[in-house]
Amino acid sequence: MRPIHITNSLSQKKELLQPLEKGKVSLYICGVTVYDHCHIGHARAYVAFDTIKRVLTHFGYNVNHVQNFTDIDDKIINRANETNTPWKTLTETFIGSYFEDMDALGVIRANQYPLATAFIPQMIALIQDLIDKNIAYVGSDSNVYFSIDNCPNYGKLSHRNLDDQESGARVNVVSAKKNPMDFVLWKPAKPDEPAWDSPWGSGRPGWHTECAVMVHDVMGHTIDIHGGGEDLKFPHHENEIAQAECCSNNALANIWMHNGFVQIDSEKMSKSTGNFFTIKDVLQEVEGETLRFFLQKVHYRSPIHFSKEGIQEAGQALERLYNTLRNVPMNQQIPKNQIPEFNALEEAFLTALADDFNISGALGHLFDMSRLINTHQAGSERLFNLGQILGLFTKPIQSTVSIPKNVTQMAQDRQSARAAKDFAKSDELRDQILASGFQIKDTPDGFKLTPS
């Protein structure tokens, strides 16, 4: 298995992946709150982690991927009331919508998709444990709160200055809290809201509790990788760590990974500002693979700037790779003297993937290989196989032409003559190629042969 180095948000350093169980990687990704259709921010996250999972699998790891659905939340209840829809019907509708979008983007299904509502008893047990340990308390407003003052190392993931955070929180202080930054574990039910019985009255859990419980219950006390969007680092993932580790005294995850934001006009895309596009909106104008390729072009940890022009450029770039596959038959053997150059590019591609999943760097090597293939009119199978690792080349590929070996050889000789500035020889070979029934065109990606 190839060594893989990953930037750990917890240590803020690049670390060697050392799975708890040899050959296996446990991967938990925070899922969506199912009250609406997914937007491009969701696409960015799930394409990034789908690609990461594909790379891990290619390198020989057996990946156990778990991803939850938040199917009870204030947003769900509010949307159900606004639309006069039963909340369960609403969540089932948008779970179905999620799978439609992910299927269009080529995202492989997780091993499990636990629902938050299926783990209410386990959440109640975790909260009671925290109360028994004096790490949680019942406030005067009947909410159960987590006490950050009684949690050692709170803030270790987000690396924030908690004194500054507390000062800011006191502007909107809630008197029932001991500390303005304490967060809700259980909230009492309001009239006509979904609710469950608990030792603290009828109510429902806070959002931060569900993932900590599901990781423990479905995957064990410690997993290899926990991931999600940059916006989840604080407070959601910070609060997950606090609850889980105060209960179990074990690390919740050894590596924390976070993908960068999607930005529109240099601002983070956000539903609250109306500055967002749904995946379905975008897929009315472009194919799913084009959107996937656009999202892969920037390193997963970096912000990505969304624009129609950017997607159009991504589509054109992807089409250039497809044209290489169409124009050079898969069965065209690589000349023996060129095999080392092809091997070097393939190794560079894989090395980029193993270096913190540098997909954008790996894509650069794909285009280098595409140019090499067009130059030698051979090796397209390598390009296809490497692209498949990233979930690309999903459309049927049919060679547009079968090119005789002697014509390919003349084209390669002409390329060498041009490089040596022997233009008389170059022109002579071009004429011979034309006489054989083919035209040769020089492009930035190498030469292309087409029937005349």
Image (tube, helix red, strand yellow):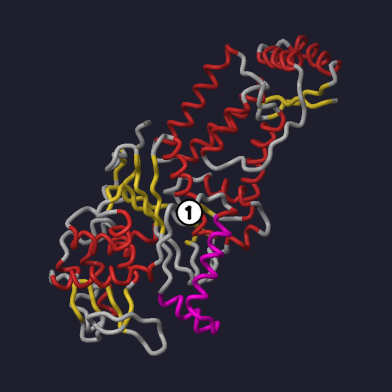
Side of 271 where 74 appears, left or right: left
Residue 110 percent coordinates (x, y)? 45, 53
- Position of residue 426 measured from the top left corner of the image (x, y, whole percent): 75, 13
The residue sitting at 72% across, 17% down in the picture is 408
Most foreground residue, 75 or 359: 75
Magenta extent? 73-102
Q: Identify the main secondary structure in magenta.
A: helix
Q: Is residue 255 above or below residue 81?
A: above
Give the residue drawn at x 42%, y 48%. Answer: 301
**Residue nearest the observer in this picture, 261 or 33:** 33
Q: Count neighbours of disc 1 (C-alpha within 10 A) and say few if under 14, some if 14 to 19, many if 20 or more.
A: many
Residue 310 visible in the shown view? no
Q: Residue at x 49, y 72 (%)?
A: 91
Q: Secondary structure at mark 1?
A: helix
Determine if residue 123 is in view: yes
Residue picked out by circle 1: 46
Q: Is residue 49 rendered magenta in the image? A: no
Classify 96 as above or below 372.
below
Residue at x 37% of width, y 68% of height: 118
Position of the C terminus, as image quadrant, is top right
